[in-house]
Image: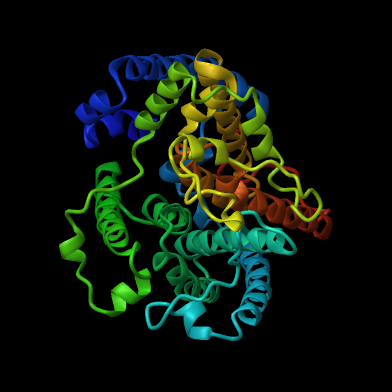
Amino acid sequence: MSIWYVGDVLYNDFAGYRTLIGDVAIENAWWQVCGFVIAFITFAPVMTGQFAGPRRPSQAVAILERRPLDHPAVQAKIDTFAKSLFVAWVLLMIVALVRVKFNFLGLFAPYLTYKAEPWSRNRMGGGIDSLLALAGYFQVFLTAGFGVILALARNRTTRRMALIVCCLSMPYYIFDRTRNTMLATMIPGFSAWVFGRVRGNLPTKFVYIGLGLLVTSLWFSFVLSNRTNRSISAAFASGASIRESAGSKHLGLNMCEELSWINRFFANGSYEANWGKRYFAEAANPIPRIIWPGKPTIGIDYAIARGQGGGSAASAGVYATISTGMIGQGVVNFGPWLGPIAAALLMAIWVGILARQDRVSNEYPARLMLYALGLILTFNMGRDITLLVLYPFIFGWILIAFWERRQERNHSNRTSSPPPWVDS
């Protein structure tokens, strides 16, 4: 929230907001931010207790302090899970190659040619578009997962396998236009390496984090400077300078502005709360449009209110959708005062789900991968609380839960005592 709302004021043209939107709408936005914070502080401990049980030390922190990932039992689980993940990745890539007519370079080395799109579809969807969307989100999870495995595995064979997958899969996202998938695929592995492998104290680790943020910022500036008129791979291949793009301003960190616009629209009567319809549309998103042709769309009404109407039918009649921000999304659904509370409740539930992954990671190390991915997706949820962001986590959870159940059946005679690194 600090980046999306407070950071908006510090980074962008707040004086311009006041002139264009008006002080009253902006003041209401700040009251809504305060309401969200108070409600979140109230709800988060309750939801954490519901999902993760009584308060206990974090297993992620235990990794920093005691480095249990090097234990042979944990490494054996990582090796086994990596093999299962590799099979899933190979099968998915076979489908992807068929979809792009075996354009190997376009899929695995877009920096040498144009980027192939095996899962491309229209905004409105139809036919098998829902399956293509699911495949795309599943690929995000697999790519992020192998980044974490590369960082944490000690077995050379497992590390080589993860390295090969990362070298083949990550360029697909690095040379994309979409920053949220870049973060979702790159940062979990980098974070796992810094906090799980890098030797040194916390200040040393934060130096690595700072360098990583600097590189990320420079690359995002390059993407923003070149994604409008050409593909990122074409810009990179043509020798476009990252240094020249370094001064470009990052776009999209303006959720306080959007919240203020929503208040302005409420005040002048051009937009009204939809009383949960937007959240319902988000929840209905997994249903394929071929099954429910009239499935509600997400955010189209707000895009029209913001002047983006007039697009083609395949694009749902808008040129682009506009994120409302996690607080603005609540306001759009339930009005200026109940909305922030609804958004805070959803984020508190999400925190409880993440706490659950942390809690059980002592017994199931693969959950640490979900935990790392979830932390990164939390940042992306600042623009909208949506399944479109959470699908990689959801599909990862399904795959890991299936794998855990299978492992339990195969090892039904294993001891029930906790791992040796867990305090009694």
Give the quadrant of residue 282. top right
| Residue at the image point whose x is 59% and y is 64% from the top | 139
Q: Position of residue 394 (x, y in %)?
A: 65, 48
Residue occupying image coordinates x 59% and y 80%: 100
In front of the other: 301 or 361: 301
- Relative placement, left or right, of 391 versus 410 is left
Q: Give me the residue at 56% from left, 49% from top.
A: 317
Q: Nearer the viewer, residue 160 or 394?
A: 394
In this orientation, does residue 44 appear? no
Residue 144: where, in percent of width, then height? 51, 59
Q: Nearer the viewer, residue 278 or 341?
A: 278
Instruction: In the rendered view, tell whether residue 393 sits above or below residue 112.
Output: above
Left/right of residue 56 with respect to residue 21 in the rendered view = right
In percent of width and height, residue 291 lies at 81, 52
Residue 202, placed above or below residue 247: above
Q: In front: 274, or 414?
A: 274
Q: Quadrant of the N terminus?
A: top left
Residue 24 visible: yes
